[in-house]
């Protein structure tokens, strides 16, 4: 069952249950997938593309949530938090910080990085290895810490 089929099935369930927040989140995912399909002109899109779409939606929600919390808009922050929970259900399991730190240390050794000036080399290799498995912001933060020490 593809991600799109799972989303469609869950939309029906959410409609029956009258779960408006869940329904709104699922429709956002479906809409993003449909936009990608029409952009490419393909009947189907690859699973990696579907995952990238869901990751993008989750990132948008996290960024909006952060802004709303800074501005003290708890009403909007609550909506974003709930939507992020629903969208996160469709993301692959993310790696923990310790595992990411170990992988990045290995990448630093493999690339032969010696300081902050090598950040581009390390980030390229690390993102290639950890894409979809860890948040880019976390990867960037850990790379900066490791190269600074």
Image (cartoon, grey):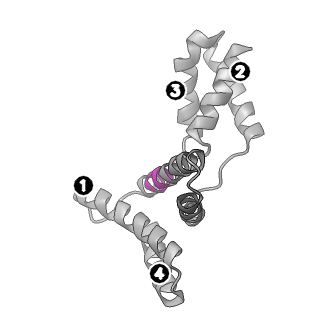
Q: Considering depth in this image, is 88 or 17 the residue closer to the camera?
A: 17
Residue at the far right in the pictured view: 98
Query: Would residue 99 be found to the left or right of residue 46 on screen?
Result: right
Say above or below: 139 vs 112.
below
Label 1, label 4: how many angstroms apart (C-alpha)?
Answer: 24 Å
Q: Which circle, 3 or 2, is nearer the viewer?
A: 2
Say above or below: 139 vs 50.
above
Name the mark on residue 124: 3
Instruction: Look at mark 2 in the image and give the residue it sits on.
Output: 146
Name the mark on residue 144: none
Instruction: Look at mark 1 in the image and give the residue it sits on.
Output: 39
In this view of the protein, can residue 68 be seen by the observer?
yes
Tag 3 and tag 1, C-beta contact below 8 Å:
no
Judge the density around disc 4: few (<14), some (14-19), many (≥20) Cα neighbours within 10 Å.
few
Secondary element at image label 3: helix
Label 3, label 2: how many angstroms apart (C-alpha)?
Answer: 15 Å
Label 4, label 3: how many angstroms apart (C-alpha)?
Answer: 38 Å
Q: Can you give x and y, in whole percent of width and height, for residue 130 in the image?
A: 59, 39
Query: Would residue 141 be found to the left or right of residue 50 on screen?
Result: right
The segment highlighted magenta reads 51-57
Q: Earlier in the sequence, mark 1 or mark 2?
A: 1
Secondary element at image label 1: helix
Say above or below: 121 vs 115.
below
Secondary element at image label 4: helix
Instruction: Look at mark 4 in the image and give the residue it sits on.
Output: 9
Q: Earlier in the sequence, mark 3 or mark 1?
A: 1
Q: Can you give x and y, in whole percent of width and height, for residue 101 in the image?
A: 73, 32
């Amino acid at each position: 069952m593809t991600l799109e089929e799972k989303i469609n099935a869950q939309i029906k369930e959410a409609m029956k249950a009258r779960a408006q927040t869940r329904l709104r989140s699922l429709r956002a995912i479906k809409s993003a997938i449909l936009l990608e399909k029409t952009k490419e002109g393909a009947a189907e899109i690859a699973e990696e593309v579907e995952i990238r779409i869901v990751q993008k939606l989750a990132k948008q929600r996290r960024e909006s949530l952060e802004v709303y919390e800074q501005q003290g808009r708890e009403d909007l922050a609550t909506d974003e938090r709930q939507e992020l929970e629903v969208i996160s259900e469709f993301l692959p399991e993310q790696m923990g910080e310790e595992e990411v730190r170990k992988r990045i240390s290995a990448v630093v050794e493999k690339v032969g990085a010696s300081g902050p000036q090598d950040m581009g080399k390390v980030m390229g290799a690390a993102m290639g290895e950890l894409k979809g498995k860890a948040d880019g912001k976390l990867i960037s933060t850990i790379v900066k810490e490791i190269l600074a020490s």
